[in-house]
Image (spheres, rainbow, N blue to C red):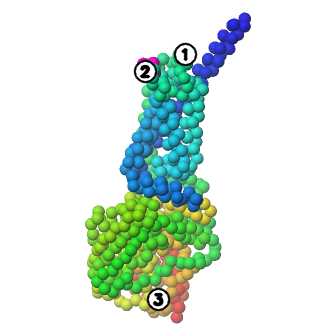
Amino acid sequence: MQATANQINARSSESAAARLIVAAAAVRAAFGILMAIDAWLKWQPAFAAHYVGYLQNASNAQPHYLQPWFHLWLRLVVAHTGFLVTATRLIETAVATGLLLGLGRRITYMAGALFSLLIWSTAGGFGGPYTSGATNVGPALVYALIFIAAALFEHLLGSNPYSLDYYIERCYPKWASLVEWAPTRTPQPRPALDWDYQLGAIGAIFVVLVFALCTLGSAMMGSPPTPQNAAAAVAPLSIASRAPLANVSPPVLPPLINNGNTAAVTMTASDATIQIASGVQYQAWTFNGTVPGPILHVRQGQTLNVTLVNNGTMQHSIDFHAAQVAPDVAYRSINPGEKLEFSFVAATPGAFIYHCGTPPVLQHMANGMYGAIIVDPAEPLPPADVSYVLVESEWYTAQAEGTLMTGDYNKMLSVTPDEVVFNGIAFQYTDHPLTAKVGQRVRLYVIDAGPNLGSAFHIIGGMFAAVYPDADPKHALSGVSTYPIAPGQGVIFDAIISQPGKYPIVDHSMRNMEIGATGQLRVTP
């Protein structure tokens, strides 16, 4: 009787162990499907195009004590982007394959855990710098723990017959020393399903995987991206202070850089924390530490000698809409620590944008890398009494912490701005109006930096004395109250106000006006 009871207990233990082995193999295969889907995403062109940008966005939200690590990692990524993109794709594809087939399990689990921990350490979540869109650190740590748990189960349960490793070991016993976490049991466990059935199960997994990838691909191609955590998003205007802005961006047209035949300018690309609303900051990419960058004022026919210095943490470039120059030479991207010199003749007068042209251009511009260059015409316009420069642009934000915001690339793609602003800060010229006197000619150089939306520029209560689409006085328009400006375009407006008062300056797109694109022209006797 005692022997029979022992046999029953032994069979029960073996049955429980067999169920655990089956469960461990099923979890491994299911996890392999998730990894395969993510590996498929990595082989898409958008992953390579935005690889550096995703890492930069992830780094923007980190505390100061982590910045040295991020700067080191970014320098490595920028210098070896192509290699790291390919390595990332191959590593995750290999890990997914190992999980699905149970191939090289010890190597697969170790590689997967280290891979996930690296993502966690770069604070990008399971995806961060490696996939499209994720910025949560949680999933990467969870993935690492799953790999570690799988390795522990392998160690406790021994050889798993539901794996390709099991069948390789039967032909080549030395394979076990490479892939098994525990000594092979003798006798080896016999699988409840023979290899033919397991092939059928693998085939079913493959069909499910293909279906999932096709469905995901259709969804990605058929619907626009949506902002992450839209329901919980914190808009900068919702946390802005009611106190008036203490400091504003000077809108006055500066003097000419130089009165001679040449002018020299140094533009430095760098990261900086700037203000985008009263009491709200943004981790921006800038030219010379401000958004917009410095106003450049030159004459038609002058040669502008440009030096671009990259003091940022990723590649940057500069593109002048006032220039006619080979972009592959003058507008090429340079690495951190490098500088680029080129020259062009400002042959065409007008109000123009300059901006970073490094892919993804949308992200670089939406993070603040733009400014205005004003080229005075050789045949002068009517003399102005006061001249202002307004650069309209959009902010697409995600909360980093408190009142500190960072960029949200999905919002940039879906064109859902949190602010539309003049010269970088919402409502700043409502708190600190532009000024003029009755009868003065007020000249407004207005550039739409976008990067996505056009502007309908208007002075409420006023009519433009002249609109110069191309800075040619012969082409001046009159009788205009509102004039459209496309992204990347600049237009010159003259206004002569005959009565004192407070005249709102707005983008007549009401949505844009409500979220920051408004100011005031205060006219006194």
Q: Residue at x 49, y 58 (%)?
A: 71
**Is residue 231 in view?**
yes
Residue depth check, mark 3 versus mark 1: number of the one nearer the observer: 1
Q: Residue at x 37, y 67 (%)?
A: 339
Q: CA distance from mark 2 to mark 1?
A: 16 Å
Name the quadrant containing residue 480: bottom left
The kind of residue on which mark 1 rests is Thr
- Secondary element at tag 2: loop
Total tally of numbered discs in the picture: 3
Viewer-proximal residue among 386 and 498: 386
Viewer-proximal residue among 187 and 520: 187
The answer to whether the residues at label 2 and label 3 have Cβ atoms under 8 Å apart is: no
Residue 407 is left or right of residue 328, and the answer is: right
Q: Position of residue 502 (x, y in %)?
A: 54, 85
The kind of residue on which mark 2 rests is Tyr
Q: Position of residue 156 (x, y in %)?
A: 60, 26
The kind of residue on which mark 3 rests is Ile
Range covered by the magenta-colored residues:
167-172
Q: Position of residue 487 (x, y in %)?
A: 39, 68
Which residue, given by chain and number where applicable, does mark 1 sit on? Answer: 186
Determine if the magenta segment contains residue 170: yes
Other residues around mark 1 within 10 Å, as few (<14) / some (14–19) / many (≥20)? few
Q: Tag on residue 45?
A: none
Q: Tag on residue 497?
A: 3
Which of pointers 2 and 3 lies earlier in the amino acid sequence? 2
Image vertical order of residue 157 relative to residue 72, above or below = above
- Secondary element at tag 1: loop
Residue depth check, mark 2 versus mark 3: number of the one nearer the observer: 2
Q: Tag on residue 172?
A: 2
Other residues around mark 3 within 10 Å, as few (<14) / some (14–19) / many (≥20)? many
Viewer-proximal residue among 520 and 83: 83
Q: Residue at x 32, y 77 (%)?
A: 304
